[in-house]
Image: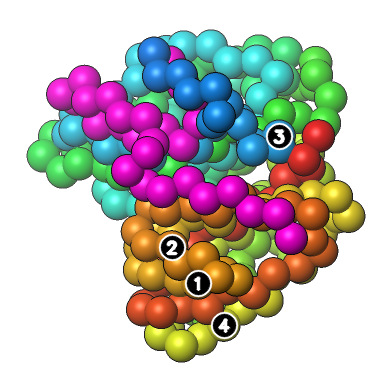
């Protein structure tokens, strides 16, 4: 098993006042040649958006974009006619494909929004743009792995156009979970949303991450009550 440790304090950081952003991989004005991507995972941004603020209408193309709300809410609008508000428990996916314009705003004037946004390279370019979202029961991830988006169409998760899978988990202290890759040659990027876990000999705390490859499976053990994000992607 090959691993790469990304401690939380080595992420890129940009505070724009209305937006306090941490970047796991090179993004915007922050560039680290050792952190450009993990396999086909290109972006994992940990954003805090101030009340009433957000991202105005802007374009994307040829990228699978997944948004997970941790705290607060996010209002989405796009040129495909979609408009919705997503909250904790909700996951949103957008295949940018041949091109899409969208905006994202915090609909509350007073409360902040904390979200993860991930970009994954698609299986092929030039597909038709697509939007979807779903509410997941957070109880189903307690001491279990809840897949919320994937290209494998396994159990009602949102579809993404790549042989990848995004999963969430909440672990009690002392509990262990075994993760098996859905496809040979894939790797997994595990981020601790909160808490403390151990994978092999590596301990990870809040917002630490571990890239895992060259293994068909691995085990995660909680050293404290923990919440996890697991992003399985092709490595090339």
Q: Earlier in the sequence, mark 1 or mark 2?
A: 1
Q: Residue at x 46, y 78 (%)?
A: 222
Give the structural element (helix, strand or loop) at label 3: loop
Q: Which mark is residue 37?
A: none
Q: Nearer the viewer, mark 3 or mark 1?
A: 1
Please say if the residues under marks 1 and 2 sit with CB atoms less than 8 Å apart.
Answer: yes
Expressed as whole percent of the image width and height from the top left, the position of residue 216 reads 82, 64
Marks 3 and 1, how far apart at CA: 24 Å
Q: Quadrant of residue 36?
A: top right
Up/down of 52 relative to 207, above or below: above
Marks 3 and 4, how far apart at CA: 27 Å
Marks 2 and 4, how far apart at CA: 14 Å
Q: Residues within 10 Å of mark 2 (few under 14, many from 20)?
A: many
Q: Residue at x 42, y 53 (%)?
A: 208
Q: Which mark is residue 204?
A: 2
Q: Residues within 10 Å of mark 4 (few under 14, many from 20)?
A: some
Q: Residue at x 52, y 78 (%)?
A: 221
Q: Which residues are magenta?
A: 1-28
Q: Residues within 10 Å of mark 1 (few under 14, many from 20)?
A: some
Residue with the mark numbered 1: 198
Q: Earlier in the sequence, mark 3 or mark 1?
A: 3
Please say if the residues under marks 3 and 4 sit with CB atoms less than 8 Å apart.
Answer: no
Q: Quadrant of the N terminus?
A: bottom right
Marks 3 and 2, how far apart at CA: 23 Å
Q: Earlier in the sequence, mark 3 or mark 4?
A: 3
Q: Earlier in the sequence, mark 3 or mark 2?
A: 3
């Amino acid at each position: 098993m090959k691993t790469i440790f990304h401690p939380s304090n080595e992420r890129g950081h940009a505070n724009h006042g209305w937006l306090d952003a941490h970047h796991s991989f090179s993004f915007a004005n922050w560039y680290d040649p050792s952190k450009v991507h993990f396999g086909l995972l290109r972006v994992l941004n940990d954003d805090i958006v101030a009340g009433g603020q957000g991202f105005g209408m802007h374009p994307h193309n040829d990228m699978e974009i997944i948004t997970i709300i941790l705290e607060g809410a996010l209002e989405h609008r796009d040129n495909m006619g979609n408009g919705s508000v997503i909250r904790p428990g909700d996951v949103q996916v957008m295949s940018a494909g041949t091109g899409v314009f969208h905006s994202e705003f915090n609909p509350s004037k007073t409360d902040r929004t904390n979200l993860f946004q991930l970009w994954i390279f698609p299986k092929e370019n030039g597909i038709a743009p697509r939007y979807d979202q779903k509410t997941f029961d957070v109880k189903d991830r307690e001491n279990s792995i809840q897949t919320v988006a994937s290209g494998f169409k396994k159990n009602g998760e949102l579809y993404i156009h790549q042989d990848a899978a995004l999963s969430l988990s909440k672990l009690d202290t002392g509990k262990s979970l075994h993760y098996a890759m859905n496809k040979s040659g894939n790797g997994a990027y595990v981020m601790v949303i909160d808490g403390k876990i151990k994978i092999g000999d590596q301990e990870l705390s809040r917002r630490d991450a571990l890239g895992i490859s060259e293994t068909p499976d691995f085990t995660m053990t909680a050293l404290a009550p923990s919440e996890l994000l697991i992003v399985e992607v092709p490595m090339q």
